[in-house]
Amino acid sequence: MNDPTLDDIAGMPAPLALHQESVQPEWIDYNGHMNLAYYMLAFDHATDAFFDFVGLGEAYLKANNASTFTLEGHITYDRELMAGAPMRFETQLLAYDAKLLHYIHFMYHAEEGYLASTNELISLHVDMTARRSVAMPGAIVARLDALALRHDNLPRPEHAGRVISIAR
């Protein structure tokens, strides 16, 4: 879906289901499963789909000379995926303000249905000329507002806000 209207966004299922792909053979490591680096690549594809959906994708960059930079990310590896496994991604908007987006992707095995991995991210809206953060335009915030109306009713994901540590 290109350039969704506010009604399109408000009518979308929550969480969003915007991306699917399969584990490529070259993504498999010597343990026989998808290498951790390729989880990030697949999640980056899901981020591209999410940003296209809310209007912050590559077309936005070209038209506005503004983009997003990732400030922080966290991946969980819940279950392994093998070569050829179909993946489906769901995305939930957790929070946003004038300059920041906080969201989480869920990677599922598309046929077996199990959660394979999650990717929680915070992204910053940036003026590409100044290379400084700036507020997002009102039209983008309005899209996020419409999306938040659906996503604010979702339960907070168990994987969101986790801290990495070893409990002793």
Image: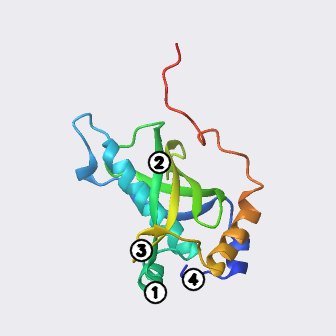
Q: Between disc 3 and disc 2, whose residue precedes?
A: 2
Looking at the image, is 6 positioned above or below residue 118?
Answer: below
What amino acid type should be assigned to the residue bearing mark 4?
Answer: Asp
Residue at the disc numbered 3: 130
Residue at the disc numbered 4: 3
**Among the 4 quarters of the image, the one containing residue 92:** bottom right
Q: Between disc 1 and disc 3, whose residue precedes?
A: 1
Residue at the disc numbered 1: 63
What amino acid type should be assigned to the residue bearing mark 1?
Answer: Ala
Task: Tell me the mark number nearer the camera, choosing from 4 and 3.
Answer: 3
C-alpha separation, residue under disc 3 versus residue under disc 2:
24 Å
C-alpha separation, residue under disc 1 versus residue under disc 2:
27 Å
Q: Are marks 4 and 2 in contact (CB under 8 Å)?
A: no
Residue at the disc numbered 2: 73
Residue 148 at x, y percent in the picture: 72, 63
Q: Are marks 3 and 2 in contact (CB under 8 Å)?
A: no
